[in-house]
Amino acid sequence: MIAAETARMILRGAETDFIATSKQAANALLRRKLPTSDLPNLAEILSQIFVITGWFQNAPSVAGVENSDEPKLTSDVIAFFQMLLNRLAVVRLDPAEHPEGDLLYHALQVYELGLAERDYDEEFLLACLLHDVGYAIDRREPIPAALEVVGRFLTERTRFLIENLPEAREYIKTHTIRGGLRKSEHFEDLQLLALLDIKGRNVGVVTATIDEAIEYIASLDSAWDEY
């Protein structure tokens, strides 16, 4: 009941943070606060979102698909990404670090910078576009939330880039990082994403729309099917 009401509130666009919204839904339905342990988890909320929207209705798992080495940008996955990205438009962080304003604008700036560097690289461009999408799910723990909710639709490389981005940003500032990350075959890509994340924080920059960005990335995904 609470998970279903949370899903409806999120889909109406009234709220962004999944966890905070579940608390509001519980208060509205039960007229009392519930302990966090009694609130629906992310999987339960997602399940209700998918039931209401009809996304992934033929998939076997509760959240649509299992992690895969070659996930595809199906129409359902694209619709889900669009929903989450749209919610970043009302998420604002510390203006000292993010003078550009909302996180959607930031994500689209990073995507544009990534496009200039790697216009052929679907996995890298998805990391550019989705790296902050966890803030539309749980603002307290955005990276774990993103990996739990969106990670199953991404390749291992894209998940790696999103998961380790905070450490890579610190590396740019401090020049220290875990040896395991430095040895990764994706370390150069991770450094580039961190640099673009820092650069993509300007005012007045013209960017693609969400639809344009995802359409371009999906075209790269489709192009691989020809080989």
Image (cartoon, grey):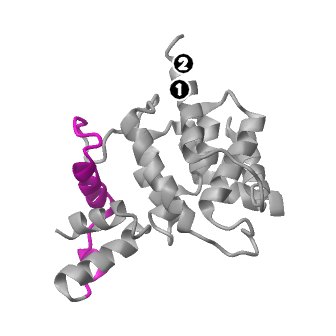
Q: Amino acid at mark 1?
A: Asp
Residue 36 in the magenta stretch? The answer is yes
Q: Is residue 2 left or right of residue 220?
A: left
Q: Which residue is mark 2?
A: 224
What residue span does the magenta drawing correspond to? 33-60
Tell me the kind of residue under disc 2.
Trp
Residue for point 73% across, 58% down: 169
| Residue 221: numbered disc | 1
The residue sitting at 73% across, 33% down in the picture is 118
Q: Residue at 32% of width from left, 78% of height from top?
A: 23
Count every numbered label the image shows and give the total.
2
User: Quick check: marks 1 and 2 in contact, CB under 8 Å?
Assistant: yes
Real-space Cα separation, disc 1 to disc 2, in angstroms: 6 Å
Q: Is residue 177 visible?
A: no
Which residue is pictured at 48% across the width and 39% down the height?
A: 154
Q: Is residue 177 magenta?
A: no
